[in-house]
Image (spheres, rainbow, N blue to C red):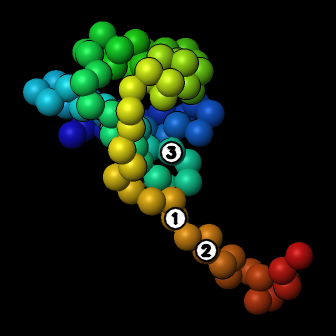
Amino acid sequence: MEMKRLNSGRLRAAGYERGTRTLRVELDDGSAVEYSGVGEEVWRRLAQSGSAWSFYRDAIEEEFAGRRVAQPREARANPLDELFGKD
């Protein structure tokens, strides 16, 4: 699935598979969620939206059942913490 880069709210990327009507969204924490049964018009509107995060929250997250396909990234230690301490 080809992903389109987004930088809106927590969205970082989204992609759509026409044959299976599957929408995949990737969030800023590294997690990914797939939604099945999403029409092409909904995908087009998300991809072209000036505020994709708001559209996603209102028209996708609340309307379709999602399935998490990637877990959030583990919090990684900052290599500078060893030099300067961690607060």
- Cα separation, mark 3 vs mark 1, equals 10 Å
Residues marked 2 and 3 touching at CB (< 8 Å): no
Q: Quadrant of residue 53?
A: top right
| Residue 33 in which image quadrant | top left
Q: Residue at x 61, y 74 (%)?
A: 76
- Residue 62: percent from left, percent from top: 50, 24
Secondary structure, mark 1, is loop
Question: Residue 11's x, y, as percent?
Answer: 52, 37
Confirm whether residue 17 shows in the render: yes
Residue 85 vs residue 49: left or right?
A: right
Q: CA distance from mark 1 to mark 2?
A: 8 Å
Q: Do the CB atoms of the residues marked 1 and 2 lie less than 8 Å apart?
A: yes
Q: Residue at x 35, y 14 (%)?
A: 42
Question: Percent position (x, y) of residue 73?
Answer: 52, 64
Task: Give the answer, above or below, for where 82 lies relative to 31.
Answer: below
**Numbered label attached to residue 27:** 3
The numbered dot on residue 73 is 1
- Mark 2 closeness class: few <14, some 14–19, many ≥20 residues within 10 Å: few
Q: Nearer the viewer, residue 52 or 61?
A: 61
Residue in the picture at 25% in, 24% down: 37
Residue occupying the point 24% across, 38% down: 2
Look at mark 2 in the image and give the residue it sits on.
76
Q: Quadrant of the N terminus?
A: top left
